[in-house]
Image (cartoon, helix red, strand yellow):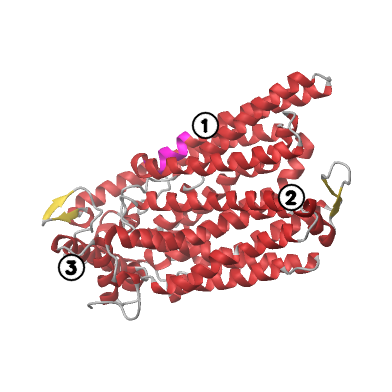
Amino acid sequence: MERLPGLNVANFLEKRQLLIAINCIAALSIFFFGYDQGMMGGVNNAKDYIDLMGFGHVDPVSEEPIITDSLLQGGIVSVYYLGTLFGCLGGGWVGDKAGRIKTIALGAAWAIVGAALQCSAQNHKWMICARAVNGIGTGILNAIVPVWATETAEHTSRGQFIAIEFTLNIFGVVVAYWLEFGLSFIDNGNSEIRWRFPIAFQIIPLLVLLGSVWFFPESPRWLAKVGRVEEARFILYRLRGSSQEDRERAELELNDINNIVALESKESKKNSYLHMLFGIGSGDLHTGRRVQLVIWLQVIQEWVGIAGITVFAPTIFRIAGFDTFKSQWISGLNNIFYMFATLICVFTLDRIGRRWTLYWGAVGQGIAMFLAGAFSKLGQDATARGEIGKAQSYGAAAASFIFIFTSVFGATWLTVPWLYPAEIFPLQVRAKGNAWGVVGWSIGNGWLTLLCPVMFSTIGSTTLHIFGACNILAIPIVWALYPESNQRTLEEMDLLFAAPTPWVWDAEKKFAELKEQQPDLVKAARRGEHVVDPETGVLVHPTTSKADDAIHTESEEHVSP
């Protein structure tokens, strides 16, 4: 094949330029995701919206929202996560059947419909349905976009590209916040444009995504899986380069992909969501174990405290003595710090790995949570005693640790729980596997969206100590159960999870054994010589498929997780 049919950017760009173009399109989806998350915070403070939905009113003196039906307010927000739950499962199924590009287009179109319904809502029933529809579209995109990005990237820079995309994710949060902050000055914040326009604004990146994604190449790994090998070969050539050396390495990478496709077809016959969840019929691929890992990693991501900070930060700023306007300004500034902190992950994730990124993040976040909770409590006690000066000092200290927490989270735990699910699953169910990660995110986010207000109203700042403890508990969990995926090809993941137990030390031991037994399987080829770096393609002789023998040499029995 000399070129792809039609107008496709892969016909004109190659190597890093093509990868950057792909990640720009993926970043549009991630930007929408961040914007959509950040948008509801401002919408919930709009007077016209509160009156129209009927869950409260705005105090005419303080201009603060007074919520009389918190269940309705929380339900409108959290039904979105119910939508993402169903959307990601549908998106994963479609993604493995119809391909990554068509699924991205489906998700964008669905989200456009959801956004249009939201910005035209006339009552809370309408809004609840619209939020659910919008959530389905978001779930579809979240299930498939990270998979498309990781399947096209080289593994030495896979984490970097995903981290860049999540910088755009928080940029979406920032845009949503400051757009709504500016609109709050129109008609003294009483106009319906304060909430309808921000909702409608998200349609712009979605339209760009829907119109442009058709001109981008399909995942070569999905193409190889469905037997379209010549297209896969051409796209790999364009992704890896056009020199003779680059083409040889791309050919070896394609051989490795084909071997893994053959292995997975023999090893696992049952690939429904139910079979994946319980590890039924996956043999030594241990798909069920991987599903549990990605679900709980996303749940833990929420419990390390980011959801709590979103809820409690305004209270801390009030303790510090900031008025409503200044609290809003500082919250927006915190989001900007959050966005720039994600750039740290761009430069560290592929250098120190996924595990160490989670380690140092949990330590920094845990310390910040404990201290923010302690200073908040001291500030509240000082306020009760009438010591306003001390209360403001304590509040300012607590606010500083809020900034530290969000910065550390942006540099660590924001990205890894989204990258890991897109890396570790077998090719035949990779989109479905990533969908399970979105299921975990939906459960964790939806759960805490409803639970956090109750926790803070009942035990106050002690809630932050609970989040701090969760950070400490996360360290041994990651250490014991989550193998390192950094600097390993997507095809090596089946070897990494071949061990009969879930422990990391067993996984690494089994991986090393399989590498030693089949050295050609996991070593890259560069100018015809074997090297340790496997990025440019695993060297497997085209005439023999050794992957199947490699996994079964040491383990004859199939152990479900």
- At label 2, which amino acid type do we have? Phe
Q: Quadrant of residue 318?
A: top right
Q: Position of residue 20 (x, y in %)?
A: 36, 58
Structural crowding at the residue carrying mark 1, measured as other residues with C-alpha within 10 Å and reported as few (<14), some (14–19) or many (≥20): many
Q: Is residue 325 magenta?
A: no
Do we see residue 448 in this rendering?
A: yes
Cα distance, mark 2 to mark 1? 37 Å
* Residue at x 28% of width, y 65% of height: 257
Quadrant location of the N terminus in the rendered image: bottom left
Of residues 259 and 535, the one nearer the viewer is: 535
Q: Nearer the viewer, residue 362 or 102?
A: 102
Instruction: Choose between 79 and 428: the one closer to the eye.
Output: 79
Q: Position of residue 502 (x, y in %)?
A: 43, 48
Farthest residue, direction left: 528
Q: Which residue is mark 3?
A: 544
Q: Is residue 158 above or below residue 10?
A: above
Could you tell me the amino acid type at mark 3?
Answer: Thr
Q: Which disc, if any, is residue 442? A: none
Q: With 477 as the anchor, is 521 left or right in this view?
A: left
Q: Residue furthest right?
A: 60
Decide: is 514 above or below 331: below
Q: Disc 1 marks which residue? A: 364
